[in-house]
Image: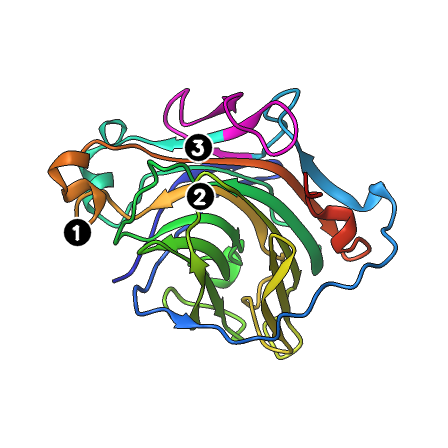
Amino acid sequence: MNFSSYRIANFVGYAVCSAAIFFCLQSCERLGISKKKHEPTKPEVANDTIAHFDFEHGIGEWPEKVVCCPWSAKLDSSVSRGGKKSLRFELQEASFTKEQKNTLIGPEAVYGLIPNDVKEGWFAFSVLFPQTFTKDTIEESIVSWQSLPDFDAGEEWRSPPLLLGVLNDSLVLEIRSDHNLVTRPNEYTFERFNLGPVARDKWLDWVFHIKWAYDNTGKIEVWKNDALVFQRLNQPNSYYDRKFPYFKIGILRIGWTNAPGSVNTRVSGSDEPRIIFVDDITVGNAKLDYNHVHTKSK
């Protein structure tokens, strides 16, 4: 099954459509890597921090905001990672049209940054899934790195080259890449990896170290709660685009009623909202390191 989403979003310096997301649902594969600990290095100066959001004094500046309603993305004081507030994303079935709920135009509540020239960087964020975030057969994107197409070369929006999502109560990482100068929709290499079960009512602290490449020089390292859970070195992880992928966070799902066994087909949960909380988001360039961006244990 393919998962796509087409939205109109405003970027600073860009007037483009929002991301199209295609989820090719297939069985997840277990990942076997060495569980080495991250060796600390001296952090660089804060000037190399591209963006930071702790939500203590507001939501902050997000160039891309794809929300339908005031409650789609709002500050919440009921839970937080370290301070007093977090950012809550919510989807409700009643807020979307029949076409959005039943076609490949997926409902979403997502905030994002902008396309950039940062080839290598660090990304840290914390996510909490409440008990109401029940198991579902419809895949949902939680964090993605979308790539701006080279429209003048004939490209269109494609799935994000990198995506962290949830499927069947498992955390999944999806990687798409293409070495061709022009990438066509669905014409790319696709892989999905299982990063373990979804933990509820518990903060999951994530750190991603990414070096973007359409050839065999790419790098992806992922830590969850201070443990290295994924490592992929010297392999492609993006498209052959002029700009490098940009960070997006929130909930995006395909439709609402077209997957047998999904939460929306159960009588008891037909209108159950999908909610997540996020906090302590940091985006930095290659001069930073793990110790500079990760959320300290509290």
> For residue 119, what is the image quadrant?
bottom right
Question: Residue beneath label 3, please?
Answer: 89
Q: Give the amino acid at mark 2.
A: Cys
Distance (Cα) linking label 2 and label 1: 32 Å
Q: Give the amino acid at mark 3.
A: Phe
User: Can residue 156 be spotted in the picture?
Assistant: no
Q: Position of residue 78 (x, y in %)?
A: 50, 22
Q: Main secondary structure of the magenta part?
A: loop
Q: Give the amino acid at mark 1.
A: Gly
Rendered view: 181 above or below 281: below
Question: Residue beneath label 2, please?
Answer: 17
Distance (Cα) linking label 1 and label 3: 23 Å
Question: Residue beneath label 1, please?
Answer: 261
Secondary structure type for disc 2? strand
Secondary structure type for disc 1? loop
In front of the other: 13 or 202: 202
User: Can residue 231 be spotted in the picture?
Assistant: yes
Rendered view: 99 above or below 61: below
In front of the other: 100 or 185: 100
> For residue 159, what is the image quadrant?
bottom left
Would residue 127 appear left or right of 226 to someone viewing this image? Answer: left
In front of the other: 106 or 240: 106
Q: Earlier in the sequence, mark 2 or mark 3?
A: 2
Q: Please give the label number shown on residue 165.
A: none
The answer to if 112 sits in the magenta stretch is: no
